[in-house]
Image (cartoon, rainbow, N blue to C red):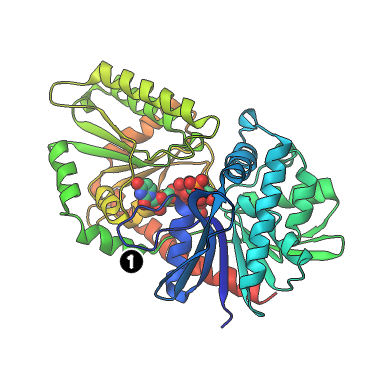
Amino acid sequence: MARILVVSNRVAPLSEGQAPTGGLAVGVLGALKEVGGIWMGWNGEIARESGTPLAQQDSGAISLITWPLSQYDYDTFYRGFANSVLWPVFHFRTDLLHYRDEDYEGYKRVNRIFAERLQRMARPGDLIWVHDYHFLPLAQYCRELGMQHKFGLFLHIPFPSDQVFRTIPHHADLARAMAAFDLIGLQTSDDLQAMRDYYERHLGAACSHDTLVLNGKATRLGVYPIGVCPEDIQALSREHRNSRESIKLKSGLQHRRLIISVDRLDYSKGLVERFRGFERLLDTRPRFRGQVSFVQIAPPSRADVHGYRSLRRLLEQTAGRINGRWTELSWTPIRYMNRSFDRATLMSFFRASQVGLVTSLRDGMNLVAKEYVAAQPEDDPGVLVLSEFTGAARELSEGALLINPYDTAGMARALRSALDMQSAERRRRHEIMMDVLRKNSLTAWRERFIEDLGGI
Ligand SMILES: O=P(O)(O)OC[C@H]1O[C@H](O[C@H]2O[C@H](CO)[C@@H](O)[C@H](O)[C@H]2O)[C@H](O)[C@@H](O)[C@@H]1O
Ligand SMILES: O=c1ccn([C@@H]2O[C@H](COP(=O)(O)OP(=O)(O)O)[C@@H](O)[C@H]2O)c(=O)[nH]1
């Protein structure tokens, strides 16, 4: 079997017990654990120069090769073009687009540094699997260095509509460079359709349902919804159900029912809308006052990027206002925590809760939704209330209660239905969702992508 060389900006810590940042790191780590490979990326640190020193860490069959970024590259590549242009636009937030020429230059420079590293590291026959919007031109730069490998790109975030994508300065250059990949994987068929539309309408590419041809070069397109390992999560949540943290959570609840949400503190996650939905539940259904607690775990993310700091302030105000209005001596409605938890603890929290609430305004997939389902006890599962604007909603629509996060009253109604749902109905829905999770597992995601890339 060919060796797999993975490139992503964010990599997961290899040591047990540390909370990884975001679903990409969780997903790639899980996928590589099974087959091994080399994983290259940023070590999360700032140094004098990007790319050195290079560190290698081995764990089982995975070799992690990481390096720092210079302050300037971090500012222009990561904070700048990646997270102030591509991230907001791909999440349909053109109002948050902040473009600067120097950021675009930095983005291209860091991509060239990664291309050079990759060239030194790759052996003939390696399959190169690149992840996410940080590296749209990477395959193009590698080709310019003479690399003839098979390059695959998996985009973890949504692909926006043609009109929205065109708000990115230099969008056509980026899209032409992306066509240097042999395979581009997307989370949903909507994303694939949007990408195809752009190439067809704007660049005049010839597109069939799974291939686009631009200037004589063919790129395969495919839908590969990222998944989880349901059995591992089930086992983890069972084993840790009486962990210290889990017992602390339960004793704080004093037998009240629990709604739980876990997200990076990001404007794409619909956190403010969610707080308002919970407030509406308390407003309109007095019987839930004092009876239901809402725990929001929201580790800070990209705190130095435009839009994130003001979101944090708004959330603090909103949670403070709602708690100020409803808190009783023995009950706090919202417990809002800006910290992360390790995976095992999170899964035990999911197991202890009656409702998992996901309200993203746009989300490539949302692994938390899938993890919530997998962590439930089969005989008494909780209910997933899920935004229709997540990739996960495309797979879990039969088992979850789907909501539009902009519809506050609708969200409150869904929360009420979830809290009132009878056990038989909960079990029925849970079974349907578990079947989907088993079918579209993390293993299936990796196998299908790598098989398709290898077969090109
Ligand atoms: O690396 P950061 O800037 O700290 O951000 C964390 C990651 O956020 C995004 O995750 C996405 O990938 C998930 C798994 O496929 C998906 O479920 C989720 O919908 C996406 O938002 C981002 O795409 C990653 O590059 C970041 O590492
Ligand atoms: O305190 C935390 C918060 C989140 N996560 C994990 O981070 C991932 C978040 O992925 P998701 O796809 O939901 O969203 P993203 O952050 O990638 O946009 C999930 O696996 C969570 O279990 C974690 O391990 N600890």
**Closer to the camera in the image, 400 or 257:** 257
Under circle 1, the secondary element is helix
- Within-10-Å neighbours for mark 1: few <14, some 14–19, many 20+: some
- The reply to whether residue 209 is in sight is no
Is residue 207 depicted above or below 21 in this figure? below
- The reply to whether residue 207 is in sight is yes
Expressed as whole percent of the image width and height from the top left, the position of residue 158 reads 60, 47
Is residue 281 depicted above or below 305 in this figure? above
Q: Is residue 99 left or right of residue 335?
A: right
Answer yes or no: disc 1 within 8 Å of ligand 2: no
Which quadrant holds residue 164? top right
Amino acid type, label 1: Glu
The outermost residue toward the top is 325
For the C terminus, give its image quadrant. Answer: bottom right
The outermost residue toward the bottom is 1
Which quadrant holds residue 105? top right
Q: Which residue is mark 1?
A: 231
Expressed as whole percent of the image width and height from the top left, the position of residue 25 reads 46, 56
For the N terminus, give its image quadrant. Answer: bottom right
| Residue at 26% from the left image edge and 17% from the top image edge | 324
Q: Is residue 294 left or right of residue 136?
A: left
Expressed as whole percent of the image width and height from the top left, the position of residue 270 reads 46, 33
Is residue 208 depicted above or below 265 in this figure? below
Expressed as whole percent of the image width and height from the top left, the position of residue 40 reads 54, 63
| Residue at 56% from the left image edge and 43% from the top image edge | 71
**Closer to the camera in the image, 435 or 45:** 45
| Residue at 84% from the left image edge and 49% from the top image edge | 203
Which quadrant holds residue 431? bottom left
**Closer to the camera in the image, 52 or 222:** 52
